[in-house]
Image (tube, grey):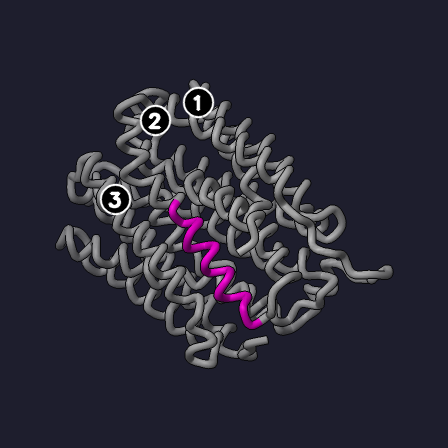
Amino acid sequence: MRIDLILLVVAYMLSQFYRAFLAVVSEALERDIGATAQDLALASGLWFITFAAMQIPIGWALDRIGPRVTSAVLLMIGGAGGSVVFAMAGTPMHINIAMMLIGIGCAPVLMASYYIIAKTYSPRMFATLAAVIVGVGSLGNLASSLPMAMVSEAYGWRAALIGLAVVSALTAVGLWFVVQDPPRPKGKLQGSLMDLLRMPAMWLILPLMGVQYAPAGGLRGLWIGPYFTDVFGANGASIGQVTLLMAVAMIVGSFAYGPLDRILGTRKWVIFWGNVVVTGACFALYFIGSSGFWLAVSLFVLVGLMGTTYPILMAHGRSFLPDHLVGRGVTLLNLFSVGGAGVFQVATGRLFRVTSGEGVPVDVPYNAIFLLFGIAMIVGLIPYLFSRDSLD
């Protein structure tokens, strides 16, 4: 793998960290600045929504400007700058602003690497390389679990965020000097985002793209901490261990899915049945209530393991994209994925609020969230059944 892709993977590790660390520091943020679970749901949702909104201009920038400038500049301004704002936060509103800035900074890094892969490597290798990047990058998810809990406990969450700002700034400088822009197509090629939206094949993939990451991303990035605290009385160390298990499962799943399309000769059915398992796990969490700590842990891990079809689903969508619209195409797919996750973060926060109350069993709001995820997965899977399989 090229050195610039390796550095982009480092940047993606930061992106994975930022989207998931709130669950680990939720108790400290509530104690220090009064940030409730609903506040953090909004902040996490704003990260995803801002990240998603940036995909349209980033798609244009990748096709017109290239991945080097796009990734380096945004990571420096948003990633490093947003971390500093977070470290100085005094109210939940400051957290919202910080997470939006960080979302802007993280938005281009994975798409920049996918753009380079799409332009440089064989289409049949896209899913495998995309999964490797997500799998290695998911070490950031791992770092945001128990390691982040330990650092925050030892030095405080503000010091941890200052350290992340420094790492983000150094990574951005490295991207500026190392990333190599692929050659651009010769001649003046016509095409726009509307050309992509007029493709029927895309509209059979986009609904599943919009929901498939929501259960794994939402449970790991936001609800795993409050759920095990409220329902099972877990302490900070136990939450760190549970989030670590789910993070490891997501890494293993990313690597496992990568070559399966070439091994089994199908992308569509690997994606479909993997997401069927996720759907079943969400409904199982709904039905078990507070009946067993380790059963709940196992189902969270199952969602993490099987809910990482993102790279192979991106490869499925990429197979239908014309070469001169690759940048806008992969960012459109990513917009649906991350935007959908962001909408569900905000929606589950509101759902938690309306289903909570005095005298209501503590597991009821979380059961409502699991049910919402399960229904949403069914809605995404139905149109995907009619999609055309492709390994190109």
Mark nearer the N terminus (3 vs 1): 1
- Is 13 placed above or below 37 here? below
Residue on which disc 1 sits: 87
Question: Circle 1 — which element?
Answer: helix
- Is 85 placed above or below 312 here? above
Identified by mark 3, the residue type is Tyr
Identified by mark 1, the residue type is Ala
Q: CA–CA distance between discs 2 and 3? A: 17 Å
Name the mark nearer the viewer: 2 or 3.
2
Crowd around label 1: few <14 · some 14–19 · many ≥20 (10 Å): many
Residue on which disc 3 sits: 227
Q: Is 167 placed left or right of 284 in the picture?
A: right
Name the mark nearer the viewer: 1 or 2.
1
* Magenta highlight: main SS: helix
Identified by mark 2, the residue type is Leu
Mark nearer the N terminus (1 vs 2): 2
Q: Is 43 placed left or right of 228 in the picture?
A: right
Residue 88's quadrant in the figure?
top left
Residue in front for this viewpoint, 74 or 365? 74
- Residue at 64% across, 38% down: 177
Q: Is residue 360 visible?
A: no
Residue on which disc 2 sits: 29
- Residue at 66% across, 44% down: 68
Crowd around label 2: few <14 · some 14–19 · many ≥20 (10 Å): many
Q: Is residue 301 visible?
A: yes
Residue 132 falls inside the magenta stretch? yes
Image mark count: 3
